Image (cartoon, rainbow, N blue to C red):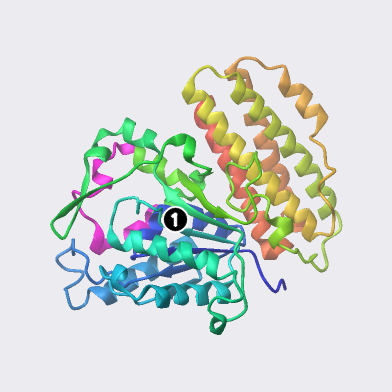
Amino acid sequence: MDEHPVTILAIFAHPDDEIGVGSTLAYYSDAGIRTVLVCATRGEAATIFCEDCATRETLPQVRTRELECACQHLGIRELRWLDWPDGGIKDLPRPEAIGQVVRLIREIRPHVILTHPENGLYPHPDHLAVWEIVRAAFDAAADPDAYPEHGPAWAPARLFTRALPQSFFQRAPGLAEFRVQLNGQQLPFIGTPDDQIDVVMRLEPWVERRMAAWNCHRSQHNPRGFSATMPDGLRCEMAANEHYVLAAARVPLPEDAQGDLLAGLADEAEPDVPAAGVPAGAVEALLEELAVHRALADLCEAYQERQTVVRDAGFFRQLLANEHQLVYRLARGLRLAGQPAGDVAAESALLAAGRGLEGTGDQLHFLREAFAAAAGRLRSRAELLSPLEQGNLWRELTTLVDAQQALVARADGP
């Protein structure tokens, strides 16, 4: 077993703050990535939005159970609490608070950390303080001279903050006008210019998991809250497309990495251990699928570049992001099977057949057939591929291919 498995650590102020990265955490959990959530407070100072689920005295216990419920839906197996005071994080002795997070980072050894943005997303004092503490701890955890009593230094590769793109606010003016009521203040949500967003995770297959996790937080379901200001489709779109800004990095993002927080980290942070007893034929199957999906990724990119309608370009962009994830996972499966993946070229016959298609309808029909064929091959090879990573690799590949089929079917029609 890998001594330091690839790990994502999410650190947020309150129970329910994790929902903003919920689809991402569910996706990586399903991919076999270790996901750890640290919640700074029990949310004991929050407004209670249900008459029968909590009282002021029971709210800390209720919100603890709500977050535990959410973690089950998101596949998070490790939940830690700092038990800092809700509403009072900014008043904590700052060196001690940073030291607590340093100790967690060195114990958990994450490769990527997710947290609140510098602006808090909205300027809640706890969000702002958590950002400042985590940002300082990101540096201090890697310094062997800082907090030596908290264990050996560990240098996370990247620190991301979640973001709401400005384009969401332009499409839903109610978001810009909405205010969070806190201690007599009215706090606005703050958008990030779209061109300043570094990673967009395309996560439609995991939206239901994020929604189920949010349903766990019943005490926080404000009927006049943030979600109520959004048009019907935008809430689902937000859950299907989670946005991130790279706040700090020791391993830069590859130039073409727009849909994976872990892109480029495999060699830096993931010394794969070849699986024992790989079934005969598994390597050949993975090589074939990798060639096919590299071809499909090239075609999705070419089709996207030819689009003149913004909506259609965005659709092909989502297909391309999913194909990049499939390629990444197939390459990792080959490494686990003891086979290098770098020399695998895109399947030439598939490329040749798809490149000559000009009309969007013909392109969609071609992709629909290609994804259906990929899904059929994966299911026929379940016995070969399911032993890799205790079945996680095969399950994730089939989930992603099924999502591609569903996307194209909706666009292509019956």
Q: Quadrant of residue 353?
A: top right
Q: Which residue is mark 1?
A: 22
Q: Nearer the viewer, residue 15 or 93?
A: 93
Magenta: main secondary structure equals helix
Q: Amino acid at mark 1?
A: Gly
Q: How many marks overall? A: 1
Is residue 220 a member of the stretch shown in magenta?
A: yes
Apparent side of residue 151 relative to residue 23 in the rendered image (left or right): right
Apparent side of residue 278 relative to residue 388 in the rendered image (left or right): right
Q: Nearer the viewer, residue 330 or 134?
A: 134
Q: Secondary structure at mark 1?
A: helix
Task: Identify the residue at image location x=26%, y=33%.
Answer: 173
Q: Nearer the viewer, residue 108 or 72?
A: 108
Quadrant where the N terminus sits is bottom right
Magenta part of the protein: which range?
211-233
Q: Residues within 10 Å of mark 1 (few under 14, many from 20)?
A: many
Apparent side of residue 119 relative to residue 188 in the rendered image (left or right): right
> In the rendered image of this protein, does residue 39 appear above or below residue 228?
below
Is residue 113 a member of the stretch shown in magenta?
A: no
